[in-house]
Image: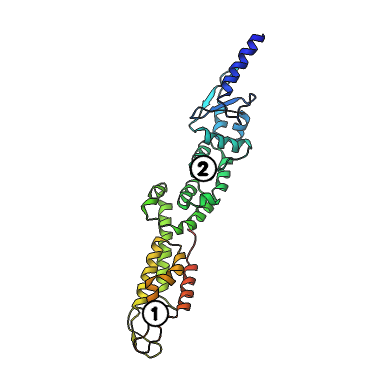
Amino acid sequence: MHMENTETAVVCKEQSDTYHPLFSSPGADVVLGARDGVLFRVHSFTLRTTSGWFRAMFSLPQKSESEQPVVIYMDEDSAVLEALLRCVCGLAIPRMDSYDLLEPLLYAAEKYEMPGPLSIARALSMTPPLLSSPLRLFAMACRYGWEDVAKLASTSSLSLDIHSPEHRTVLQKLTSVPLLNLFEFHRNRRELLRKRLNEAPFVDDGGGASCSHCGSAVDYHTWRELKYVMVLTMDSRPLGDTICDPGLTEWPEAQACWDARCVTCSRVLYDKKETLRAIRDCIDQLPIVIE
């Protein structure tokens, strides 16, 4: 009897070396095997109550119980499986400030029908480290139907030129409807600003204008050139935050506009302070979230 117990202990010790330290309790009746060989002992009750996939699997007729549970090999590696099991077992959640972990975790949670990890990932998605990649966040939010997260990501995306080749890989993850909505959202900000810059209180540069002081004919070509630069900037950065500062204080086109004068009476053609205020108001009134 003593010899038999010793042999059993040796076997358990050799196996326990491959178990994840947080999931190695001999009392757990299910063993999950990660793709990279790490094993996880988990209670079937936990899996059954937190996962629709496991609940369905355990409802099927099972083989007779043996001394050692059968290993259920999973598609996920140990990092993803650990994060997933931490979420459903009520353990401390690891740092998830990288899409390289969060995206496969979400995929696994969706596959195994685990609403708990999905809700945790949704909350974590709106933290600063993940918000720093708004297009990736927008694609992820659209995939899982997180409307509020998608709107937040769309606002953050306004600082990017989504036409740049560097964003092509991420945008390819989007289906056609959200992709077109995102392009339309960026384009509309540019076009709305273009439209507002052609309306009062801004000057009409279409021709036939005269100086308000002496009545001489004036040409507002400097304003026309400045508008072109502003619209072009909105095309590459729809947020428009660089237009007023440093744009309207440092651009050569802006300097030419503020220096423009009537050739007859030398009166300045544009009120710099009032024009800056009006442009800033126009930008502030543009839509800031995708519909």
Classify 171 as above or below 71: below
Q: Nearer the viewer, mark 1 or mark 2?
A: 1
| Residue under the point 45% across and 65% down | 242
Q: Is residue 173 left or right of residue 52?
A: left
The part of the image, by quadrant, that contains residue 96 is top right
Classify 25 as above or below 102: above
Expressed as whole percent of the image width and height from the top left, the position of residue 116 reads: 59, 41
**Which numbered marker is on residue 102?**
2
Q: Answer few, some or many: residues within 10 Å of disc 1's Cα (few below 14, many 20 plus, some between 14 and 19).
A: some
The scheme the figure's colours follow is: rainbow
Give the number of marks: 2
Q: Is residue 2 left or right of residue 261?
A: right
Whether residue 59 is visible here, answered yes or no, is no
Towards the viewer: 212 or 258? 258
Name the residue beneath numbered marker 1.
259
Whether residue 30 is visible here, answered yes or no, is yes
Q: Answer few, some or many: residues within 10 Å of disc 2's Cα (few below 14, many 20 plus, some between 14 and 19).
A: many
Q: Amino acid at mark 2?
A: Leu
| Residue under the point 37% across and 80% down | 260
| Residue under the point 50% across and 27% down | 37
**Which numbered marker is on residue 79?**
none
Q: Dots 1 and 2: beta carbons under 8 Å?
A: no
- How far apart marks 1 and 2 lie (CA) works out to 53 Å
Return the residue found at the far bottom. Answer: 214
Q: Secondary structure at mark 1?
A: helix
Q: Amino acid at mark 1?
A: Asp
